[in-house]
Image (cartoon, rainbow, N blue to C red):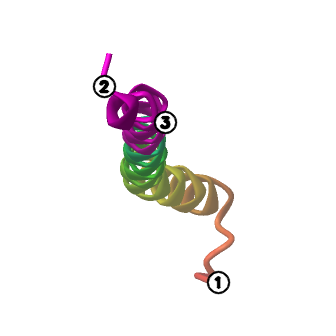
Amino acid sequence: MNPADSGATPRLLASLRQLALTALGIAHTRLALAGVELEEELQHLVDPLLCRIVNGLGRAFDFNGAA
């Protein structure tokens, strides 16, 4: 075995470990972003529905100020 190669394996393993940690970090970030996107889409669906419900209740109980 060549003495110059003796440190290559630990450095290679350290590099591979760092690469794996970086890939894991990227995956974590992507999942977090997907969660935020999902929450925003859900909010876009719920807001108009909630407005329609409140508007309907206002009309039903005549809370809109009409005499």
Q: In this orientation, which residue lies closer to the viewer: 12 or 17?
A: 12
Element assignment for label 1:
loop
**Disc 2: which residue:** 2
Element assignment for label 3:
helix
Identified at 36% across, 49% down, the residue is 41
Disc 2 residue type?
A: Asn
Q: Using the rendered image of the protein, determine whether residue 66 is visible from the camera's viewpoint.
A: yes
**Disc 3: which residue:** 14
Relative horizontal placement of residue 44, taking residue 62 as reference (left or right): left
- From the top left corner, tell me how far across and down residue 39 is, in percent: 48, 47
Identified at 59% across, 57% down, the residue is 54
Q: In this orientation, which residue lies closer to the viewer: 24 or 15?
A: 15
Give the label, 3 or 1, closer to the camera.
3
Give the label, 3 or 2, closer to the camera.
2
- Find the magenta span and give its range: 1-23
Q: Using the rendered image of the protein, determine whether residue 45 is visible from the camera's viewpoint.
A: no
- Magenta stretch holds residue 28: no
- Magenta stretch holds residue 10: yes
